[in-house]
Amino acid sequence: MFAQTNHIYGELFGPGLFSSINYERDLSLEKKVFVRMGYGFFSMTTTGLIASTKLSINPLILGVHKYWGNKWRFEVGGGISYWMIKLEGDNMLDFSGLNFDFEGSYPMYYASLGLRYQNPEGGLTMKLGLSPTIVSAEGQSASIISPHVGIGYAF
């Protein structure tokens, strides 16, 4: 049988921050290298005595990953998580060591290391791993090391 070349999945945490929807497409002849495209969502609100502030970050994810194995696969990869940041309210918010008092779009860089179950004939997939992200915006920088867990379908 031929290995499946399309994969769509939802992921919690990782480069999408809180949650993301992702599509992968195999690029190599050996079916071991794929490109990842995704859209993530993160939002947090703080409420003070007088006003509240809401921070929304919507990452666009683009990466290249390589895997080894058949049904149980070891995976390593990396790419860009392009954060679109929106801040509503007058207060500054702290998230992972960054003080957000700004809006805009900023490229962040992520890596991914994990294990996935994906039958070469297609069907249900599951993945688990770690995704460190280097965050740098408006003269501030931090590192986020986040676990990721995903479930999807290969076809």
Image: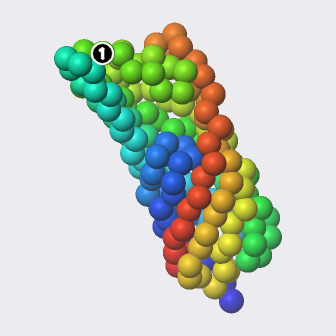
Left or right, residue 54 beside residue 148: left
Left or right, residue 39 beside residue 87: right
Q: What residue do we see at 50% from left, 20% from top?
A: 98
Residue lying farthest front? 49
- Residue 59 image point, x, y percent: 43, 40
Disc 1 crowd rating (10 Å Cα; few below 14, some 14-19, many 20+) is: some
Which secondary structure, mark 1? Answer: loop
> In front: 30, or 20?
20
Q: Quadrant of the N terminus?
A: bottom right
**Position of 12 relative to 25 (above/below):** above
Q: What residue do we see at 51% from left, 54% from top?
A: 12
**Position of 54 relative to 103 (above/below):** below
> In front: 86, or 154?
86
Evaluate whether residue 98 shows in this view: yes
Residue lying farthest right? 69
Residue lying farthest bottom? 1
* Quadrant of the rendered image containing residue 83: top left
Left or right, residue 16 beside residue 72: left
* Quadrant of the rendered image containing residue 50: top left
Q: What residue do we see at 52% from left, 78% from top?
A: 155
Picture colour scheme = rainbow
**Position of 52 relative to 73 (above/below):** above
> In front: 129, or 60?
129
Residue lying farthest top? 139
Residue wearing tag 1: 91
User: Looking at the picture, which amino acid does disc 1 mark?
Assistant: Asn
- Residue 16 image point, x, y percent: 49, 45
Evaluate whether residue 27 shows in this view: no
- Residue 40 image point, x, y percent: 42, 47
Q: What residue do we see at 77% from left, 61% from top?
A: 74
Give the number of callouts. Answer: 1
